[in-house]
Amino acid sequence: MSDSRLPLTASHTFGVACVLLGTFLFACKGIFIKLAYAHGISAAPLLMLRMLFALPFYLGMAIWLHKKSKMVIRRQQLMPILGLGLVGYYLASFLDFWGLEFISAGLERLLLYIYPTVVVLILAFWKKKAILLKEMIAMAIAYVGIVFVFLHELQFHQTFSATLKGGLLVFFSAVSYAFFVVMTSEKAKQVGSLTFTTYCMLSASAGVIIHNLAISDLRELTQPAPVYWLSFGLAIFSTVIPSFLMNKGIASIGPSKAAIMGSIGPVVTVLFGAWFLDEVINTTQLIGAVLIIGGVSLVGRK
């Protein structure tokens, strides 16, 4: 009896480790971006460099999956997945990168963290799913927390117009990702979560490259060496590795537990923002962070 339990326990422990490490690496994303911005690069070319460095790994995974599995993705399955990749990873990432030009890494991570509350609202208005009183209270707590972190941002970092613009960009990034989450579960089950993630990232990479070829000046990709190193770190340590770690972790322990453990993400970003970027931490921000993390965790517990 004890022998039969060991694989499950080991799998659960490994899943927890994957989620914690993946959350930690994702939380470092804003730090990489802000450090790169200090060298003068803007959102679009930095996102392009990130995806160019990440693309070979996702191409390699796609080839490996094609050789390993005899399952062929039909066009009816592939097109929605590619569309979701554009919404969930390309559009959300671009809005996020753009917003970070105006606000601190700590505020960005806290705003992104509210996406589960947006998922609840989308399900309520689109799928006509009732919102429980507990969920309403939890969302109210989270959004009051946003007021506190905005007040902190205005006090120490930016003007009202810049904070509002950056905050709205990151908020719409969270909305874009929330829509992706709502649409994901059925598609991921059809083809497998690893295949789904890989093709979504390939679609996002194509979207970023087309965006830059059509709109941006490719000369902006010529940057000092530190930007390339930061872009490489952003691509590998805050994109490729955590995307597969989170995929494995969620498969092992389930999305609810993974979402609750994800509450360490904003804390890591706020602390690292203070350490690497000299972002100020004060009581107002801490109150806001506690309210946001607490409210979102209550929503995610269901």
Image (spheres, grey):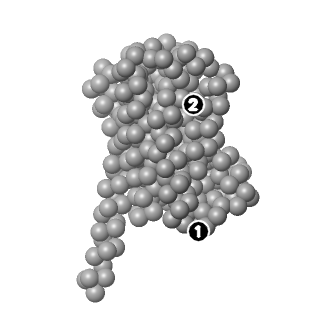
Mark 1 or mark 2: which comes first in sequence?
1
Is residue 144 among the parts visible in the rendering?
A: no
Q: In this image, 195 relative to 257: left or right?
A: right
Q: CA distance from mark 1 to mark 2?
A: 34 Å
Is residue 46 among the parts visible in the rendering?
A: yes
Q: Which residue is mark 1?
A: 70
Q: Which residue is mark 2?
A: 94
From the top left corner, tell me how far across and down residue 220 is, in percent.
53, 17
Work out whether residue 31 or residue 85 is closer to the camera in this orientation and state it.
85
* Residue at figure coordinates x 55%, y 15% from the top left: 219
From the top left corner, tell me how far across and down residue 31 is, in percent.
37, 29
Q: In the structure shown, which secondary structural element does the residue marked by tag 1 occupy?
A: loop
Q: Amino acid at mark 2?
A: Phe
Q: Quadrant of the N terminus?
A: bottom left
Q: Quadrant of residue 223?
A: top left
Work out whether residue 111 or residue 81 is closer to the camera in this orientation and state it.
81
Q: Quadrant of residue 188?
A: bottom right
From the top left corner, tell me how far across and down residue 180 is, in percent.
61, 47
* Residue at figure coordinates x 54%, y 66% from the top left: 69
Q: Amino acid at mark 1?
A: Lys
* Residue at figure coordinates x 62%, y 38% from the top left: 206
Q: Is residue 192 above or below residue 179?
A: below
Q: Which mark is residue 208?
A: none
Q: In the structure shown, which secondary structural element does the residue marked by tag 2 occupy?
A: helix
Q: In this image, 4 relative to 61: left or right?
A: left
